Amino acid sequence: MGLTRDLSRVQVIFVVSVFYLLPLGVGVVSHEKGIEISDDQFSSLISVYAIFSALLFGAQISAFSIFRGLTDFQAARFDPNEVDAALKASVETNVAERISDLKLAFGDINANISYLITTSVVLLCILLVFSISESANVFFSSVVISLTVHLVLILIMVVKQCHLIFSAAYSE
């Protein structure tokens, strides 16, 4: 995930705590409370994660399309036939900076969506194994709960990243 770029030590500790230790803690608490996912719920979760993975893949393709449109828009602002050299250099620098910023932002979104897809597929595999083997128990339920909490937190982060990028694009 593109979480640690330019973060201070305190921010890295916060990110690790929220995105990894919090879900692990929820999983441990669910294990200690003896929470067990029923077979019916396993079947429902399999459907949810299968659909979620497909939707995420579609969102990833859409994000790339939006990225291409935004970079093409920025590139169209540059007129290679501009006579004023100072203006031409200024616009060219501005366009290059904006495209670079877009590449970084969409690179992070792409990495995080890929991570979400991978996490969803891992959860789907875990659910399928325990659904087929009918060996679901408290431990495996707590693993599924922990990974689900982690997945939801990452999804919230991706939605926030998209919101920031689109807000900036709308303000232009």
Image (cartoon, grey):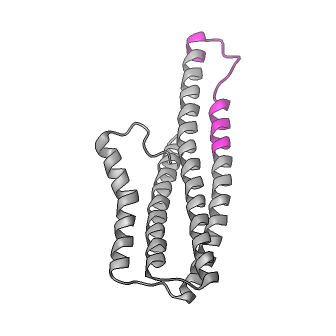
**Is residue 143 left or right of 52 when viewed as pictured?**
left
Locate residue 103, reporting x and y percent.
58, 37
Kindly report the secondary structure that dominates the magenta region of the rendered protein. Answer: helix
Q: Residue at x 66, y 30 (%)?
A: 75
Picture quadrant of residue 129 = bottom right
> Camera-side residue: 160 or 73?
160
**Is residue 136 left or right of 9 when viewed as pictured?**
right
Please state the total of marks drawn on the protein image.
Answer: 0
Locate residue 20, reporting x and y percent.
40, 58
Q: Is residue 76 above or below residue 66?
A: above
Of all residues, the one furthest to the right in this rendering is: 81
Q: Residue at x 34, y 67 (%)?
A: 25
Picture quadrant of residue 12 = top left
**Is residue 14 left or right of 138 when viewed as pictured?**
left
Locate residue 9, reporting x and y percent.
31, 41
Locate residue 104, reporting x and y percent.
54, 38
Q: Is residue 63 above or below residue 80?
A: below
Q: Is residue 68 above or below residue 61?
A: above
Q: Residue at x 63, y 43 (%)?
A: 67
Q: Is residue 159 magenta?
A: no
Q: Residue at x 63, y 29 (%)?
A: 77
Q: Which residues are magenta?
A: 67-88
